Image (spheres, helix red, strand yellow):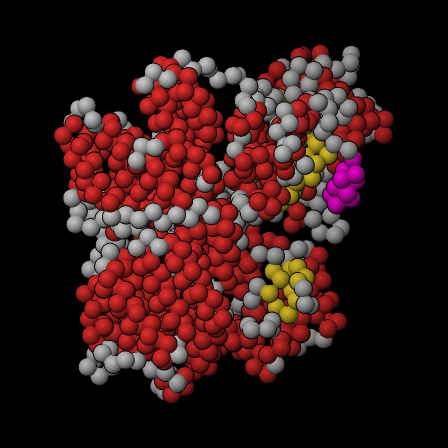
Amino acid sequence: MLEDMLGRSVSPVFVGRAEELASLSQALEEARRGAATAVLLGGEAGVGKTRLVQRFAEQAAHDGSLVLYGGCVELSAEGLAYAPFTAALRQLVREHGRARVAALLPEGAERDLARLLPEFGEPSGDGETDSGRARLFEQILTLLERLAESRPVVLLIEDIHWADRSSRDLIAFLCRNLSGPQVLIVMTYRSDDLHRQHPLRPVLAELGRVGGVLRLDLPRLSKDEVAQQMAGILGRSPAYHKVEKVYDRSEGIPLFVEALVDSGVDCAFPSSMQDLILGAVERLPDETQRVLRIAAAGGIRVGHALLAAVSGLSDLELESALRPAIAGNVLQIADGRAYLFRHSLIREAVHDELLPGEHQRLHARYAEEISRDRALVPPGRAKVELAHHWYGARNDGWALISAWEAARASFHAFAYTEAIPLLERVLMLWDRVPDAAERIGADHTAVLEKASEAARASGDLDRGLKFVKAALAELDETREPARVAKLLVRWAQIKVYKEKTDVVEQLRHALRLVPEPDLARVEVIVPMSQHLMLRGDTEEGTALAEEGLALARKLGDRCQEAELLLNLSLGHSLAGDTEATLATNLRALEIGREEGSGRVITRAIGNNVDTLNDLGRWQEALELGEEGWRLAKKYGRVRLSGLFTLNNIAETLEAIGRWDEALDTIERALNLGPVLRNRHHLLRVRADVAIGRGEVDVVEGILRETGVLSERPEDFVQDITNSMRLRIGWHMLRGEPDAALAVAERTLARPAQSPKAMLGWRLLALLTVVCDAMEEAEPARARAVSEQAAEIAAGLVVSGPVAEAYRLSYSRDFDAAAAAWERLNRPHNQAKALLRAAKIAARSGDREGAASRLALARPLADGLRAAPLLEEIDALGRRVGAPQQPDQAPPELLTPRELEVLRLVALGRTNRDIAKELFISAKTVSVHVSNILAKLGVTTRGEAAAAAHRLSLLSH
């Protein structure tokens, strides 16, 4: 196996193969019934076939199956005869003894097996004849079927692309003739080794027509999955830029990921892997290798016309030279008459073989040909390609000019991440080109400013801060105050993303630098007014935003007008006017769309997802959130606006009880390397789910990381409110209501609380739980907190149905609150309200009323796997004599989302099909399917579908 060729770190986490593992398990279940005989698992070298089948084998063995291992060996054009079957037979004899194995066969039949293993005596004399082969095949078939009479048998055969002809024939024979149940043959092969003349190709085609044979293709890992694999290897979350680099170079092949992580910060590729990658190239004819070197200088993808122009070959000569590389799967033909290296590391390895002079000449030829005819490269790529090739040609002047032009083009295409290294190249080449400023029409500081803008937009804050500080070092605020003010604003914004609190004075200084009523002042007013709003200084923030709005409209800057509208909508939200918030956000979004401003569009959508969720319009919130996430990717703003939107999607999913999807969304966002502020937002949502499920250690870890337990200073009132709410919830979860009351006292003693209605009512509703818990132990303190809460409540408005439901909970009208939460589709809050209503009924002697409320609450809590709530419900149920839950799960225990998944499972859809249709990840689907199987008391998807129809779960 490839994995054995290198000593390297292997991730202890099994990543990205849940669906394929489930397919193998399903195939074994079908084999038990005689409905399946074999699985053909294909995939590129290093994609993880061995690890997948090993994990499957472990599970199968744990469940009682006999697992036999065989592998094909690469010795020559034809592998060792019957190698996989010899290995499996040797294992069988070693574990069970020759006599027991022979006893499973007809008398004298072991002589046929002697051809494979000498322990069975002298082979029969006609072993090489057709009749001898036929008998051997029959004996192997008989042996497998007899073994399967007592328990399931799994025969694993790896690397059948190296199988000899005899082994291929025997594999085909077994797949066609296995008729008894409980036998499954699982075979792996390298799909990238199957050139057109490979002898396995017709065998695969034949087996594809045999009933009971399943074909599986193992794909490369996604970027999220690579991040998970790296986290497993490193034991911590990897830095986002490292994930980007490893993913780009490995292209999602797990073996390459492990090698690159092992190589350290530079992600240099080990020489042993280099040899492995170049092996396929070195087997090609010399002329083909020469042309491949030319193609490698062109990049991962090079057009036919461009390659012909650079190489000087005619079309026929070029096609003749490349044909062996295409047949050997080194090159692939892409759309638009282009050639694509199968993997970027192949191109890199070939490119590294170029001699220094050859390297410069080839890149110069590419630059010259593209300059002559830009149609030789895909539309929009000419400037970037020229920057790459002039730099490779070591032409400093043209390299600087082309890098600057390419960076500007990247800005227009919202490719901020691509722009940063181009601008860094301009800075690196600056001193080598005496008239650099004249050549590009911008000074050195302007390049730094542009780089800082790209870094901030892409979320690369550390690089952005370096660029900002370098630019400020070159400026004098008395001569160029507007430029300095703009950079101070950018520095302040970076500080906010890094959760620093010393920001407001820096913004005030920037505002003082631009006293004139011009665009420079507006550009400072926008972040300044937003910051004041978030701090709770709504009066000053609103006044400043209105000043800026009037100025922006007078100057005709519609993007800044939209930004200021968004700031004013924040003020509406804090004032409790949710409808005005939504309307103002929508107006800003309309302007953003008209102006094509990605910054405005993504910010407005992120804000409206939050607003719609606060209004209880969760379906619209999720739909808009998905659109916002797509647009954030389009506009190159994934790590800022994009992850802010994902956070708001996660908050919505948490609120409506789709907790597993919320967790999946949070994990996906965290793997994308959010800035610290967004990371803390995401972790707070994760903590809400953890509190609901009783995961005390998870909550504690989050509170420590976010600085809540150390009482780290926070600037923004919403963050303060949410942090204190989580800390109170953590203490209550730990059975520490006295500590929770102390946190409540400190929270209410703060000079300012969040004026946002929903957050305020949510905190007050939680405080009633704390005060009720401490009413007997600390009546005076509990009463004091209740009185302070009442004062705050008197100043809060009710801004929508969600705030109203929290107000009802705070007012202890729990039956009305439960009805409100039911209308809002918020099962956790509904179950909590029903429980508290049941407690009141029980205290008044209404045992029947308490039991009826608990009967409604329990399936809601069970569906969420809300363990602490379930414990409370069951404890109260025992006290009031509520009937025990039936053994069979009632239909309402399947959540609406689980019913959606079950409906698609019943239609025979795969996890990936379901994920695509429901706009969730395959991993989340896998979690839902596992929950469904457990709740229905079944073990397979087919049984789940049958149970769904039997119980009429899908009738509505």
| Res 583 seen here | yes
Q: Position of residue 354 (x, y in %)?
A: 53, 67
Task: Indicate left or right for 582 with 375 as reference.
Answer: left
The residues colored magenta run: 199-210
Please tell me whether residue 771 is drawn above or below residue 241 in the rendered image: above
Q: Position of residue 907 (x, y in %)?
A: 68, 36
| Res 395 seen here | no
Task: Indicate left or right for 700 with 241 as reference.
Answer: left
Q: Which of the pair 304/934 is nearer the observer?
A: 934
**Which quadrant of the structure image shows residue 951?**
top right
Q: Which of the pair 452/625 is nearer the observer?
A: 625
Task: Indicate left or right for 452 with 669 as reference.
Answer: left
Q: Position of residue 391 (x, y in %)?
A: 46, 75
Residue name at image x 33 percent, y 82 percent: 443
**Which quadrant of the structure image shows residue 175?**
top right
**Which quadrant of the structure image shows residue 166?**
top right
Residue name at image x 58 percent, y 37 percent: 901
Residue name at image x 26 percent, y 53 percent: 716
Q: Which of the pair 152/716 is nearer the observer?
A: 716
Q: Position of residue 390 (x, y in %)?
A: 49, 77
